[in-house]
Image (tube, rainbow, N blue to C red):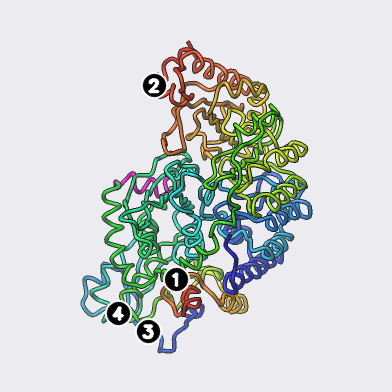
Amino acid sequence: MYKYDQYDHSIVTSRVEEFRDQVNRRLAGQITEDQFKPLRLMNGLYLQLHAYMLRVAVPYGTLDSRQMRMLATIARKYDRGYGHFTTRQNIQYNWIKLDEAPDILADLATVEMHAIQTSGNCIRNISSDQFAGAAADELVDPRPWAELLRQWSTFHPEFTYLPRKFKIAVIAADEDRAAMRLHDIGIQIVEKDGVHGARIFVGGGMGRTPMVAPEIKDFVRLEDLLSYLEACLRVYNRYGRRDNIYKARIKILIHEIGADEYRRQVEDEFVAVKALGIDPPKAEFDRIAAFFAPPAWESGLADAIDRSDPDFAVWLDQNVSAHKAPGYAVVTISLKPAGGIPGDASADQIDLMADLAEKHSFDELRVTHAQNIVLPHVRKADLHGLWTQLREAGLAEANLDLISDIIACPGLDYCSLANARSIPVAQKIHARFADLGRQRELGELKLKISGCINACGHHHAGHIGILGVDRKGTENYQLLLGGSGAEDVSLAKITGPGFSEDGIVDAVETATNVYLRERTEGERFLDTYRRIGMEPFKEALYG
Amino acid sequence: MTDTLLRFRDDALHEEPAVTLDSFLGQSNATAVRIESGDDARVLLPHLERLALVEVSFPKYRDGRGYSTGRILREAGYTGELRAQGDVLVDQIPLMRRCGFDSFAPEAPVDAAVLEASLARYADVYQPAADAHVPVWKLRHG
């Protein structure tokens, strides 16, 4: 894991002082709420329906146990004893007092954490593969690249008032666990002639106008990467639309001028930017990469696991993934228990996960964009003991990638933008499919719920997506099918007229029944949908 | 406007008023120009020699195009006065300084003490820009 040096500390500490000064000026009435808004937003502080919400950055989703415990401490000290892990691999607290926000940042700084650029029209927290450094299928650990980008983008003087927010993801495996091509910039680390470089996609995103990012460059050398990205951002900053907030994302610019014209402008700009010498030397990348050296995995460990406990065996099959080192496994802890709020964890649960990471996972945890927690490096021999402790804490739900592993935005229960509630719908769907055997019969089925068209719940990328809308003052839910945020990326399509809150639960069940009836051997829900198309589903839903 | 002008230059104030980009390009003797936020600053690059003042408009604090304008002019070697005019807020001036601006004409008054504190706040920066700050990667590797 990356560790701060004196410079990182100095920058984050300065930010705490700056924000404290800004809050004091606001509380003293020296600046208006209008003037304060861009300042607090640059620091992840939103005014929600009931209170301030603070979003804390978890760079590329990686944490150690000390940082995780601080998240629990903040939940207890400044909030109501819980936190909410987000689709951007961050955590947010929903019940924050403005005058305490600077103290929270000061506490975070003691464990090398911050809330810098977790909102605002700037480059947001860099996201990445939650299995980075552990996945059996990765080319290389993408996190040194992500940390390089974190530093470059932090307080970037030119790109802090972009037309709109800007999200970057970095992966280094063929399997895409980070929805890379649904980001403003998606980067896949690839190999060419024995050298690693960046394959760059620009202009993806969800929101009102979902787009899959086209490839802009097949290979950018590490020593050119920051110049290339500055060129990408500068073209956007100068020519992205500013007349309409809903058309201001880079995807709209690229859609309007075309990927080829955008690429041409970036290449021209790159020539100018490259001459400035803004790319750090290889030694800086190597310095960062050294922090991500693989932990000291033991050799000679057995791969066999005692599967005699049937409940354990189910969890093993569902929530445990292949690790690159023999005798190790990657564990995903589900934050989607029946009746719970997707992504929520209590302070006690956060502390327990920190303890387990310290004891069983080389002190490392990850937050996933699907709002779960990963222990990346667990000895297979320790899995049963780990599972037993998770089960006692209500953290052993064996539903990874099943229909109840739902991504949901906070919805109208918290969010001032929402048109409809998301959380109760997620809970009702989970209750409808409560039987785990039934869920496993349905297999991989990614269900995602957004409470408004801003799509924070990623409904466009759901195998089944649900979009909450307001219809004449009543919450109404549209059903979408066929999306994917993975390497087989696609955008879901709306089936037809929307449903009531209970009706949407029936509609989901109807769609799964069509799948069960139509599927062929080995097909996932998504595969069947792609083969047979929308019509059989429409027929069953509306026929 | 001059009474709220904040300057970080030692030379004398340029007396000639800034003209629009079109007027500037149409007359060979103008030495001061005003760039609206949608204008392409690169059309000025052949004329940098005769320019003493470039005023960049910030119609709203959210409109960040001027940050790119500032850097582009400095990167091309412009050494004259670079002024940010308009909805320029005290918390933005440090970033504008980094993009090469050395004079400010904010529409609303700026608290001098707050400005001084914010300009002095960050000793270290992560990335090079159009100012004298040395990025931390250079400090780390000499």
Q: Give the alpha-carbon distance from disc 2 to disc 3, as whole Å.
A: 71 Å
User: Residue A531, labelled with which disc?
Assistant: 2
Circle 1 residues within 10 Å: few <14, some 14–19, many ≥20: few
> Which of pointers 3 and 4 indicates the residue nearer the eye?
4
Relative to A424, A488 lies left or right: left
The question of residue A255 being in magenta is answered with: yes
Is A66 or A501 nearer to us in this picture? A66
The answer to whether tags 3 and 4 share a subunit is yes
The residue indicated by pointer 3 is B14
Q: CA distance from mark 1 to mark 4?
A: 40 Å
Residue A51 percent across, percent down from the top left: 71, 48
Q: Which mark is residue A283?
A: 1
Is residue A94 inside the magenta stretch? no
Report in which chain the residue with disc 4 lies.
B
Q: Amino acid at mark 2?
A: Arg
Neighbours of disc 2 within 10 Å: few (<14), some (14-19), many (20+): few
Give the structural element (helix, strand or loop) at label 3. loop
Marks 1, 2: nearer the viewer: 1
Chain at numbered mark 3:
B
Mark 4 is surrounded, within 10 Å at the Cα level, by few (under 14), some (14 to 19) or many (20 or more) other residues, namely some
What amino acid type should be assigned to the residue bearing mark 1?
Answer: Ala
**Residue that lies at the very extreme toward the front in this rendered image:** A300
* Closer mark to the observer between disc 2 and disc 3: 2
The stretch in magenta equals: A247-258
Numbered label attached to residue B51: 4
Nearer to us: label 4 or label 2: 2
Three-letter amino acid code at disc 4? Leu
Distance of label 3 from label 4 (alpha carbons): 10 Å
Q: Main secondary structure of the magenta part?
A: helix
In the image: residue B71, left or right of residue A77: left
> Mark 1 or 3, which is nearer the eye?
1
